Amino acid sequence: MSGQSLFIDTGAFLAFLMPGDQYEEPAKKSWKLIEQNHYPLLSSEFILVETANFLVRQQSSRIASAWLDSMMDSKEIRLIHVEREDFRVATAFAKKYSDLRISMTDALSFALMKRQKVQRAFTFDKHFEFAGFEIWPGDL
């Protein structure tokens, strides 16, 4: 899957879900653009777990569970399943960008995006840009 596809990172979810987040306004505008343009959306189980863990710590298990249920019912976001080779590619990304101290979740996201031929990530994390991906939308 490529073209106009967007990989949704943890920060894009959290900025929308957490009132007062520093990226709340650009996230809301971006989610509206996604709805209007019907972009194909992708993410991974690792992103969902990372987001849910943050919601548990900052809000509650009940809120995190409700959000996960909504993600499992979503027809808009396709989850990319991780394969063994994705971990090898993620490790290579982590080594290549070791000076940036990227998280292994980010490195795995890079590997999944590479495998799926997706160039754009809805994220506020500059590590995606350093790894050669386009941060979407870049002008917000």
Image (cartoon, grey):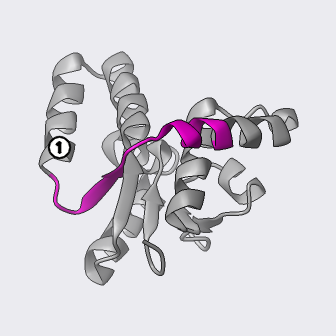
How many numbered discs sit on the rendered protein?
A: 1
Judged left or right of residue 32, residue 15 is right
96 is higher (above) or lower (below) than 137: above
Q: Can residue 97 be seen here?
A: no
Mark 1 nearby-residue class (10 Å; few <14, some 14–19, many ≥20)? few
Task: Look at label 1 and name its amino acid.
Answer: Met
Question: Residue 111 at x, y = what percent?
Answer: 60, 49
**Residue under the image location 41 percent in, 67 percent down:** 30
Most foreground residue, 10 or 132: 132
Q: Which residues are magenta?
A: 74-89
Position of residue 127 measured from the top left corner of the image (x, y, whole percent): 70, 48
From the viewer's side, name the closer residue of 31 and 39.
39
Residue 74 in view of the camera? yes
130 vs 21, left or right, is: right
The one of 139 and 125 positioned closer to us in this rendering: 125
User: Residue extending furthest front?
Assistant: 85
The secondary structure type at the circle numbered 1 is helix
Q: Where is residue 140? Give x, y as percent.
A: 56, 69
Furthest residue toward right: 99
Instruction: State whether residue 137 is above or below residue 57.
Output: below
Which part of the image, by quadrant, shows the N terminus? bottom left
Query: Based on the displayed image, in which of its 4 quarters is residue 128 positioned?
Result: bottom right
In the image, taking residue 51 as reference, residue 3 lies left or right, namely: right
Task: Find disc 1 in the rendering and name its residue.
Answer: 72
Q: In the image, what residue occupies the spot 56% across and 43% down?
A: 86
> Residue 78 lies in magenta, yes or no?
yes
Q: Quadrant of residue 35?
A: bottom left
How far from the left and from the top, in percent, is residue 96? 83, 42
Q: Is residue 37 magenta?
A: no
Residue located at (18% from left, 27% from top): 65
